[in-house]
Image (spheres, helix red, strand yellow):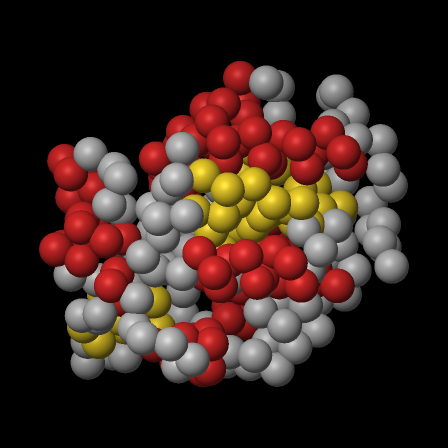
Amino acid sequence: MNGRPKIVLVHGAWADGSSWSGVIERLQADGYQVTAPQFPLTALADDVGRLRQVLNMQDGPTIVAGHSYGGTIMTALGTDAPNVVGLAYISAFGLDEGESLAALQSQGPTPPALAHLVTDKQGFAWLSQDDFVRHFAADVDPIKAKVMHAVQQPVAASIFSEAMGVPAWKSLPSWYLIGTQDEAIPPEAQRMFASRMGATSVEVPASHVSMVSHPDEAAGLIKTAAESRTATPANHVRR
């Protein structure tokens, strides 16, 4: 073992663990132990439960990185984040206590990537191929973007109205990668998330799936977080 933190990657809605493939390859090439599990996207509690399951399998300090709704999942760890020593948000939601995704999104126009959501009879929301290719993954090769759309995991629409408890970023150091061409989470919202959590942030000219179109930058931010926490005891509290 090299003493560096383990890495757990949390995918968002309309995605799965394979969305991290480019980042995983880069982190593994640098000797990091990486886990990118699948999340059910059925309820926030279910998703947090899956994250805790994976964190309990880590044998030391861990950096958790989340994309999009994956940021909500890791934020909801609250003050009970076993092994976690840092959080890396990749074009992700960083909710504060009492906030919900729906309340935030109601403050402005519907982002282009989410303009035509289809909710099925079971209450799960899906993205159309056109919106996925043209807006959600706008800077990804269209052939690859269509594959990503084909394997999308729908998200329970009820998740959008779930309120956040005490956010994990209030007690853990955070990093944030802002996608300046994001058409799902507006860049100004990402800057707000990063600012209020006191995150170390970088900006890249990326669509919402910055970890796919800019894997070097996404992996680099995660490695920066990991390097800064090397040899730091687990469950360190920042403030």
Q: If the image is split into quadrants, where does the C terminus sit?
A: bottom right
Image coords of residue 5 (percent x, y): 72, 34
In the drawing, does residue 212 fall left or right of residue 80? left
**Would residue 208 be seen by someone viewing this image from the given angle?**
no
Q: Examine the image and state in which quarter residue 2 appears.
A: top right
Q: Compare residues 52 and 126 and report the one nearer the observer.
A: 126
Q: Residue at x 54, y 72 (%)?
A: 45
In the drawing, does residue 102 fall left or right of residue 237? left
Q: Compare residues 171 and 19 and report the one nearer the observer.
A: 171
Q: Examine the image and state in which quarter residue 142 appears.
A: top left
Image coords of residue 221 (percent x, y): 59, 35
Q: If the image is split into quadrants, where does the N terminus sit?
A: top right
Q: Residue at x 67, y 51 (%)?
A: 199
Image coords of residue 21 (percent x, y): 40, 32
Image coords of residue 83 (percent x, y): 75, 47
Q: Examine the image and state in which quarter residue 227 appears.
A: top right
Q: Compare residues 148 and 193 and report the one nearer the observer.
A: 193
- Depicted 231 relative to depicted 81: above or below: above
In the drawing, does residue 43 fall left or right of residue 48? left
